[in-house]
Amino acid sequence: MAVVRSKVISLYKMMMTESNKFPSYNYRTYAVRRVRDAFRANSSETDPQTVERLVQEGQKTLGVIQRQVSIGKMFETQKSVVEN
Amino acid sequence: MLSQGRTITSLLLRPASRLPLWLGRAASSQPKELMEKDELRPLYMDFQATTPMDPRVLDAMLPFQVNYYGNPHSKTHAFGWESESAMETARKQVADLIGADPREIIFTSGATESNNMAIKGVARFYKAKKRHVITTQTEHKCVLDSCRVLESEGFSITYLPVQSNGLVDLELLEASIRPDTSLLSVMTINNEIGVYQPMKEIGRICRSKGVFLHTDAAQAVGKIPLDVTDHKIDLMSISGHKLYGPKGVGALYVRRRPRVRLEPLQNGGGQERGLRSGTVPTPLAVGLGAACSIAQQEMEYDHHRVSMLANRLIQKIMSELPDVIMNGDAEQRYPGCVNLSFAYVEGESLLMALKDIALSSGSACTSASLEPSYVLRAIGTDEELAHSSIRFGIGRFTTEEEVDYTAKKCIHQVNRLREMSPLWEMVQEGIDLKSIKWSQH
C-alpha cells in the first residue's frame, strides 16, 4: 500500500509541476484545478485495481500535459489582463 | 485603457508588411501583428461565440495532421484504414454523448451546414405531401434563413412567437401543427439568452402528431445531458467549436428508426451514406469525437463550476447596480450564458469601455450591425433595453479572477456611463421617461 501511495503522490506532484508550466493563463489554471480536484475526488479510493487504472489514466494525461505545454511554448502570446 | 487605444492606431498606421519578403505570408499568418508584445490580452468572456480548444482535443487531433493523413474513404491501403478507424471511433464518441447509434451521425462542416441540411433536406424530401414547416422567432439566423429559402420555393412557414421568458408556448405550438406539417425546428439552448426549451414536451407533441423534430443543439451538446431517444428528437445539429473542439466541423444526427429521410444538399462521392458527399476531414472529426468524449466525462464537473461562476457574476453585478435586467427565463436556462440589460446605458458604449474583456452584445454572426438583437425583440424587450444588453459567456476555462475582474469593471463603467447620461439623471429625479414627448428640432 505504501508503495502505491508514494507512486500516487509522485504522479500528483509531477502533474502539478507540469500543469503549472502552461504558458496560457486559462489552460494553466484549468489544468492545476482539474488535476487537484481529480486527485481529491478519488482520494478515498481503496480498490487496488481501480487505483491502478486511475494511475494509468493519470500517466496518460501527464503525457498530454507535457506535449501541450511544449506546443503552448512554441506559440506563446501576451499575458492576460488578470495575470497582473 | 490607453494601451488599447494604441492598438487601434498602431494597426492603422503600421505598414502592411514589415517582414522581409522571403518570410512571405506563411510567417505573417501568426496573429502577432494585432497586438504589441508588452500589451495585455483581454480576458475571454464570449463562450457562446466560440470556445477555446481543449488541449486534450488538440492532442488527439495532431497525429492526424502529421503522420496519419490517409483519406478515410480509401479502401485499398493502410493509410485509408487507419483514418477510417479513427473516424469511426469519433463517430461513436459523438453518438455516445447524445444516446444515438453511430450510424445515425453524419459529419458536416458545422452547425450551420447541419441546420441547412436538416431543414431544407427534410422539407424537400417530403414536399409531395407536406409543405409546412414550423420554427420559432428566436432561432439562429441560419435556421431562419433556410426557412426563408423554403418559403421562396413555395413552402409555408410558421415562425412561432415566444413568451417573454424566451420559451415557446406549448399549446400554441401544438395548435400550429397542421396535417401537412413535415418538420418542427426548435433550438435547444438559445445562443443569446441561454434559455432551455422544454425539448421533452416538444418531442412528445411532435411524435404524437407525426411531425419530425429538428433541434439546433449547438449550444447544448456537451453542456447539459441530452438523449435523442428520451427527448424524441429526430434530427440534431452539433457544432465542434462550441464544445471545446475544432472549428469547421460539426455533425447532424438523423434518426434511423422511425426513419427520417432527407434530400442531400451536396452531391458527389456518396460519403456519409450519400447524405453529405465530400471527404470527411479526419483530424477535425477526431477532434469533434475527442471533444464529445471529454464533454461527457466532464459534464457534471463543468456544469457545477459554470453555475458557481455565473452566480458569482450575477450576484456581484446585481448587488451593486440597480436597474439591471436578466433576459430570458430565470430557471429554464443554461447558466453559462448570462444576458443582462443595463438600463440607461448604451450597450455599444459599455462594450467599448470594457475593451479588455472579450464580450458581445449577442450573436457573433450579427455583431457587425448596430440593430438591437432580434431575439431580445422577440421576447418583448424594450428597444432601449435591447440596445443596452450584453452577453457574458462563461465556460470550462473561466476563472474566479476573471469573473471578479469583469464584475468590478462592469460595475465601474456602468456607473460612469450612467453619471454622464441625462436620461439617468432624469430617472433619478423621478421623471418617467415614457411620459416625455421627444420633439424634433
Image (spheres, coloured by chain):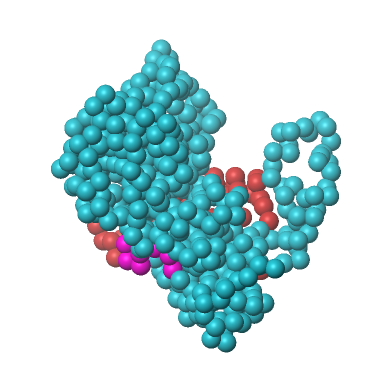
| Residue at 26% over, 34% down | B182
Q: Position of residue B86 (x, y in %)?
A: 40, 30
| Quadrant position of residue B77 | top left
> B272 or A54, which is in the foreground?
B272
Q: Colour of chain A?
A: red
In the image: residue B55, left or right of residue B95 = right
| Residue at 83% over, 32% down | B21
Rendered cyan, the chain in question is B
**Which quarter shows the N terminus of chain B?**
bottom right
| Residue at 55% over, 49% down | B366
Q: Give the magenta-colored segment's residue range.
A: B326-334
Q: Can you see residue A52?
A: no
> B348 or B441, which is in the foreground?
B441
Q: Where is residue B431 in the image (x, y as percent from the top left)?
A: 54, 83
In the image: residue B229, left or right of residue B125 = left
In the image: residue B159, left or right of residue B15 = left
- Magenta segment: does it hold B327? yes
| Quadrant position of residue B147 | top left
**Which quarter shows the C terminus of chain B?**
bottom right
Q: How many labels does the image show?
A: 0
In the depicted structure, whether residue B75 falls above or below residue B311: above
Q: Where is residue B320 in the image (x, y as percent from the top left)?
A: 52, 81
- Magenta segment: does it hold B133? no
Q: Can you see residue B191?
A: yes
> B251 or B31, which is in the foreground?
B251
